[in-house]
Image (spheres, rainbow, N blue to C red):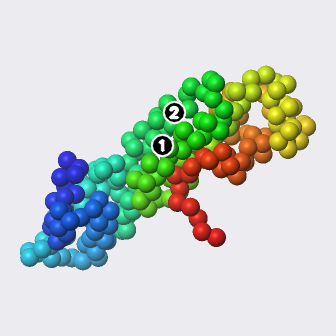
Amino acid sequence: MTATTVVMLTLMIGLQVSDATPSDMLAELSAFYALQTNAGKIFVGSSKMETNKVGSLMTIALQSKFLSFSFTSGRTPRRRIAPQAIDRFKARVRELTRRTCGRSLSQVAKELSCYLIGWRGYFGFCETPSVLDKLDQWTRRRLRAIAWKQWKRGRTRFARLRRRGVGRDLAAQTAGSPHGPWRLGNSPALKIAMPNRYLGSLDLASVAAPRTT
């Protein structure tokens, strides 16, 4: 239903669907919902509708998914990425980074970035930037885990960590850890050895909007 309800509501509030982009429709619905929560009755097109009727339709829309977006609840709904879209993102990243044999970390990052840039072009429109930040953190952790797995042996891991500025004790503790690559991908040692700026130097794209300084 999801798209049908959103289109119906956009028509009700006077937005021409034929000329509307997805961003237009979502923005209009957000503003319209905020307005209806502060009024007993509102005019929709040429007719007057009770707030509870409009609210019922908006509730349906808020609980639905439209073009892989949904709305947060509250007085001022925000566009957010639907959970299913986030699951698909992670599944695709896992697929792109699963087979790393014969490929350097730099090659993996560059190939992955093609997908990340395209995904950002569509979902960067969301109004919950913290979700994008968390996805960036998740992606970087996966690349660190890949590097850890590629280093294989304890001696190699210790040497790589030391070469990248990790202290002797922390490097020895991490190299001898029984934990797997995913767990250690979030460890202090690997964050020191492969900070965000290092991964950026491998041309790893970000799904979050670039920040201006």
Where is the C terminus found, in terms of image quarters?
bottom right
Amino acid type assigned to the residue bearing label 1 in the image: Tyr
User: Which image quarter: residue 186?
Assistant: top right
Q: What element carries label 2?
A: helix
At x 32%, y 67%, the residue is 27
Q: Which mark is residue 96?
A: 2
Query: Which x, y percent locates residue 100?
Result: 60, 27
Q: Report whether 178 appears left or right of 128.
A: right
- Closer-to-camera residue (136/113): 113
Alpha-carbon neighbours of circle 2 within 10 Å: few (<14), some, or many (≥20)? some
Q: Are marks 1 and 2 in contact (CB under 8 Å)?
A: yes
**Residue situated in front as seen by the camera: 46 or 11:** 11
Q: Name the residue under label 1.
A: 115
Residue 58 as seen in the image, left or right of residue 44: right
Q: Real-space Cα distance between discs 1 and 2? A: 9 Å
Measured along the vertical axis of the image, is residue 63 above or below residue 102? below
- Which label was assigned to residue 8? none
Q: Visible in this render: residue 50?
A: no
Q: Residue furthest left?
A: 47
Q: Is residue 116 visible?
A: yes
User: Under tag 1, what secondary structure?
Assistant: helix
Q: Position of residue 188 (x, y in %)?
A: 76, 43
Q: Residue at x 44, y 43 (%)?
A: 86
Q: Earlier in the sequence, mark 1 or mark 2?
A: 2
Which residue is drawn at the image coordinates 60% and 40% (left, top)?
109
Instruction: Residue at 24%, 77% (x, y): give it.
Output: 39
Q: Residue 70 in the image: x percent, y percent?
A: 34, 53
Q: Residues within 10 Å of mark 1 (few under 14, many from 20)?
A: some
When asked about the image quadrant of residue 105, the answer is top right
* Residue type at the position of mark 2: Leu
Note whether 87 is above or below 103 in the view shown. Answer: below
Query: Does 202 appear above or below 210?
Result: above
